[in-house]
Amino acid sequence: MSGAWQPGEGTSGRRIFPLDSSIRPYAWGSVTAIPDLLGQVPTGEPAAELWLGAHPDEPSRWREHPDRTGLDELIAADPVGLLGRETSERFGGRLPFMLKLLAADKALSIQVHPTIDQARKGFADEEAKGVPRDAPERNYRDDNHKPELLCALTDFQAFSGFRPVASTVELFGELIDAGAELLLPYRATLTASDGLRSTFSSLLTLTESNRIALVAQVLRAASRVAAGGGVWAPAAAATVLAGSDFPDDIGAVLALLLNHVRLRPGESIYLGAGNVHAYLRGFGVEILASSDNVLRCGLTPKHVDVAELLGVADFRPLLQPRSPASVISDSVTIYPVPVPDFLLVRIEPARATVDLAAGQPHLLVATAGTVRVDDGSGPQEITQGDAVFIAAGQAPVQVLGPGIAFVATVNGATG
């Protein structure tokens, strides 16, 4: 590779750092999707997430360095040089985003992420109480927020945000007619003042026997509605699928309150603070603030803190769960978000050379074919599944064809 690191050489002046990254083997992961993209033979074990970035729990590593130094260490040693002065000062010398290749073959937990103020307070409180950061009951593992955006690489299913109440009342009616009479009081609660919060809270605090009975009845009814092929069949089928992943878990019923979203490749969803959500099936590129703060409430055997969850969740209906993309040109599609931490860009540079803005850091991962990245010292090939960190500099870095890549940067930083 052109410009390869030599022993005794520092990072000064370097722009492009080829990365090795680790796969997280969470139980919900696909066995094949990530290995296939990487050109690896599946091991038979789940491969859920490939983490790309500088998160201290699983930093990418500089492939060419003999010690495989972590990207977090490289940035800590020269934050202004690698991030650019503006990004370094704005985000405290840390890379504010990370990328993941995420492959779900089983439902993820229904979860919610805090605002940055909630994260700072919650983290400080748990630190003061001496709760170990790796304790199962810990809610806040760092002091940052965790907004996320996922762009589908394959057909993708998710639950995202609360469905408008009138629509959920209609769905409950279909399920009640199909035999889920235990939903009757919840349908009434939904239409009362603060109905979504009250219904959600009631479902989360059911006794074990009542929960098991409700889940079983709802899933039987949902199977009938799904088989009927009507307007609510997809949402009912998604609930049945989630229930099959986690038998007797209240998450299958909680999912009925949420928008069921089906994405085609290239479509995306944005999950801001307070958005109650879960991924169900599919393969995609996820970009997020560099945080691991998750409050779970269903489809999980892990810790559930109902009081904290109710304080963080946003119970306003989400009218548009999909996140619209902005097609800038034949070769560039941007996925806008309302936070400064990150921006995701999809590029097909065979159609036109793409310039990555100078003065800001970038992470680039090739998802199809091969792209070439040129910082002025000659093009470097990035093959499917490979990723590079591109440091800030004085001039744009060019990306050219013929493959497809996703690029992460600070919001507003990519031209």
Image: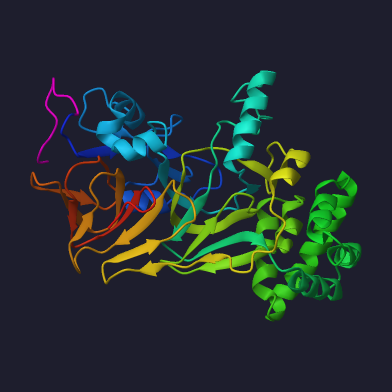
Q: Is residue 338 visible?
A: yes
The span picked out in magenta is 1-11
Nearer to us in this view, 377 or 63: 377
Magenta stretch: includes residue 5: yes
Seen in the picture, residue 189 relative to 251 is either above or below; the reply is: below
Q: Position of residue 146 (x, y in %)?
A: 53, 44
Vertical side of 12 occupied by 359: above or below: below
**Helix, strand or loop: magenta stretch:** loop
Measuring from the top left, give residue 42's x and y in whole percent: 39, 46
Rendered location of residue 80, percent (x, y)? 29, 32
Q: Position of residue 27 (x, y in %)?
A: 55, 43
Look at the picture and state if 315 lies above or below 81: below
Any magenta on residue 202? no
Quarter placement of the N terminus? top left
Report the residue at 43% width, 60% height from top.
336
Q: Quadrant of residue 2?
A: top left
Name which residue lies at 19% across and 29% down: 11
Q: Quadrant of residue 275?
A: bottom right
In the drawing, does residue 273 fall left or right of residue 77? right
Nearer to us in this view, 288 or 281: 288
